Image (cartoon, helix red, strand yellow):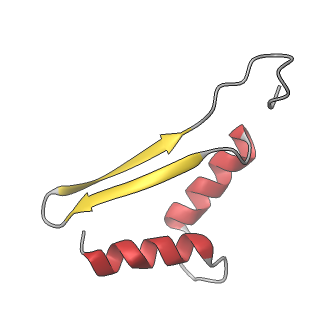
Amino acid sequence: MSAEKMEELQRENLDSNEKSFGLRGTIERIKIFYGQDIDYDIQSTEGKGTVITLRIPVYYEGDGGND
């Protein structure tokens, strides 16, 4: 993925008024299910591939997380 496309994806995730909602919508659904504490990172090399890493914290009953 080109650097320009990566920047576009990052902007779309921050700007909820964009027409495209593929990645942003997916992240929002994950936040609804797991809570707002999730984090993600996008690494891409043009012509090689893209890796999206999701970090979802583990909460145990009674520790103040999403039970």
Q: Residue at x 59, y 36 (%)?
A: 56
Q: Residue at x 69, y 48 (%)?
A: 31
> Which quadrant of the structure image shows residue 34?
top right
Q: Is residue 61 left or right of residue 38?
A: right
Front in this rendered view, residue 59 or 16? 59
- Where is residue 53 shown, x and y percent of the image? 42, 45
Give the quarter of the figure containing the N terminus.
bottom left
- Where is residue 24 shown, x and y percent of the image? 57, 64
Q: Residue at x 66, y 76 (%)?
A: 16
Front in this rendered view, residue 39 or 12? 39
Q: Residue furthest left?
A: 47
Q: How many marks?
A: 0
- Where is residue 4 shown, x and y percent of the image? 31, 81
Q: Residue furthest top?
A: 61
Q: Residue at x 51, y 65 (%)?
A: 22
Figure check: 27 above or below 59: below
- Where is residue 66 shown, x and y percent of the image? 80, 31
> Which quadrant of the structure image shows residue 19?
bottom right
Give the quarter of the figure containing the C terminus.
top right
Q: Residue furthest front?
A: 63
